[in-house]
Image (cartoon, rainbow, N blue to C red):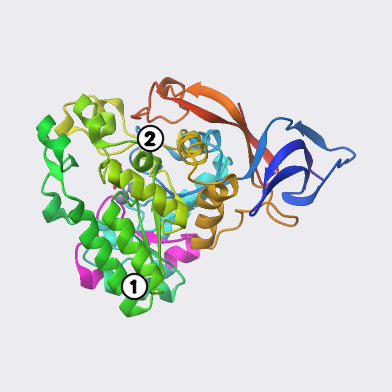
Amino acid sequence: MRKLLIKGGQVVFADEVKAADILLENGKIAKIGKNLKADGAEVIDAAGLTVFPGLIDMHVHLREPGFEYKEDIASGSAAAVAGGFTQVCCMPNTDPVCDNAAVVGYIAARAKEVGLCKVHPIGAITRGEKGETLSEMGKMKDAGAVAVSDDGKPVANARMMRLAMEYASDFGLICLSHCEDKDLVDGGVVNEGYNSTLAGLKGIPRAAEEIMLAREIILAETLHKRAHICHVSTKGGVQLLREAKARGVQVTAETCPHYFTLTDDVVTSFDANTKVNPPIREAEDVAAIKEGLRDGTLDCIVTDHAPHHVDEKNVEYNLAAFGISGIETSFSLSYTYLVKGGVLSLSELADRMSAAPARILHLEGGKIAEGEVADLMLADLNAEYVIDSKKFVSKGKNTPFGGMKVSGKVLCTIVDGDVKYRA
Ligand code: DOR
Ligand code: ZN
Ligand code: ZN
């Protein structure tokens, strides 16, 4: 029997935080209580530490197959466990696109071989993410896909999205929508507003995101299907979602740390590490995103971990790739800005970063209770450190957070009862 005893930590349960020991046996949480003893168990001293359910990131880019120079399943998995994540779901904008059972099966098999975190592939909605014909969703589901998305690109044609929502639901899959009206984006690279004018960079209006977000809400509502909105960045998007949820529309949504920590003031630095799609918005958007996370309008926090090679960022702003390497900074940024910032409790943070994505995608995990899977993360909430991309495990060093002082350090990540990361 594999046994691990986590002693003396503060444990984040769904509705309270309290001191408890946790005994893990054969990949499950066997017992939770005071002064637990277990013969032959390896003991982890968690005194002064906080024990969270293993974090789950339902939106990452692992880049394999095809773009292994940016990231691969091994480096991405290692970065994930260093960030406190026990499960990640990877987007299909690879080369070849993950639009068939063979690629889904390859990713799942390679991730098992790597054996760090659990990796759940997301299949493409349309073949080649071209928006023309639906992919074989049933076969991808059988091979291990947990959702479908054309992320990186919108599904431009509303009829195609309608068909996708209907078809996906036949297989118990949900469409994750990258909301972007490309005609309105029209080559923009940053948020459209004062700072885009100041910097002389072409702006992306909020409407480019909100029009498609509204479309997805209307489709989900009229079809009585589920839909999930990727990386919400605007105040108007949060309002649309709040109203839709109040009407009972089956819509869920995610946001990312860069949308509740930064404003587009950062683009006047011309640092291409601030270039991300959708773009970093303004103060009133940041406030609305925080309020959306607080009241549950935004269900979960994802990273949209988008590693790129330095040569794809170290170019002029207009030419740089969109994306932030975010999986190793998500917990610290979320803890610092949301918990220390008075927006969420620790239990609510665990919900947004673990339980909620598990609910949306019907994954195991997300809570600390006897009988649950032994996926856990230990953090020192009092530890402060300065973010340094040179220390990233990910191949992608592209972060706008370098030099920022944050609190809350991931020290240990446990997957299926085995320690997969120790700082
Ligand atoms: O910034 C982004 N990067 N947004 C996306 O939608 C795609 C992603 C990527 O794949 O690099
Ligand atoms: Zn996207
Ligand atoms: Zn993405």
Quick check: 54 above or below 166? above
**Badge 1 element:** helix
The stretch of residues the image draws in magenta is 139-160
Relative horizontal placement of residue 199, taking residue 42 as reference (left or right): left
**Badge 2 element:** loop
Quick check: 289 above or below 360? above
User: Which residue has dot 2 on it?
Assistant: 325
Neighbourhood count class around disc 2 (C-alpha, 10 Å): few under 14, some 14–19, many 20 upward: many
Which image quadrant for residue 369? bottom right
Total labels drawn: 2
Relative image position of residue 305 (x, y in whole percent): 39, 40
Magenta-drawn stretch contains 403: no
Q: In front here: 105 or 81?
A: 81
Disc 1/disc 2 C-alpha distance (Å): 31 Å
Residue for point 52% across, 45% down: 111
Q: Quadrant of the C terminus?
A: top right
Amino acid on which disc 1 is placed: Ala
User: Which residue has dot 1 on it?
Assistant: 220
Relative image position of residue 1 (x, y in whole percent): 82, 46
Ligand 2 within 8 Å of disc 1? The answer is: no
